[in-house]
Image: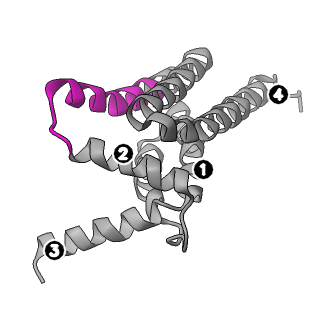
Amino acid sequence: MELSELFTQFLAWAWDRHHNPLSWFIRPFFLIPFCYFAYRRNWPGILATLAALASSMFWFPRPAAPPAWVIDFLAAEKAYLLSAWTPAKLGLTLLVPLSLSALAAAFWVRSIAWGVAVIVLIALAKSAWSIYEGGQAGWSVLPFALIGLLVCAGVIALTHRRWAKPKAAV
């Protein structure tokens, strides 16, 4: 079997598992360890989190009967990915690594406010893109983005508050 055929089979296998809504639900939560490792200036942790994020789409089993909204949205996403790559589309796609770099930079310099602002912008941009590209099916992404945004911002705020407390004298 050729390498290209193996790769095609792997992509089909992974895509089937991406139809499991759990793979969508957990994705925003990877921002928490990502921000933590950036705050701690820990490159191995940042890279491990990015690897986990990239692979998370196929961690869960293929659903027997994926929800219709998942099928509809992923059909729109697949059409987008397989359509012609224009300079505008390439620029839009580059926003993903640029936004993650901005997020890492904000926490690297320990700017919690800027970090949370970038998380909000990521959630809004992902939601807007999903609705624009996915039409009605794109609205299905909104709850995942909002829950992820609230949990990530909440965990970051609580963690920062705990770290910022003065240490008790021993």
Residue holding disc 2: 77
Residue on which disc 1 sits: 25
Give the vertical position of 100 relative to 13 (above or below): above
Mark 2 vs mark 3: which is more N-terminal?
Answer: 3
What secondary structure is found at the residue carrying circle 1? helix
Please name the predominant secondary structure of the magenta segment in the image: helix
Marks 1/2: CA–CA distance: 17 Å
Query: For the residue carrying disc 3, how many other residues have a C-alpha within 10 Å: few (<14), some (14-19), or many (20+)?
Result: few
Q: Look at 60% across and 22% down and name the residue there.
A: 116
Classify 10 Å Cα crowding around label 4: few (below 14), some (14-19), many (20 and above). few
User: What's the amino acid at mark 4?
Assistant: Lys
Eyeballing the image, is 155 above or below 157? below
Query: Residue type at mark 3?
Result: Glu
The CA span between labels 3 and 1 is 30 Å
Secondary structure of the residue carrying numbered label 3: helix
Residue 110 point in image, percent of width and height: 56, 21
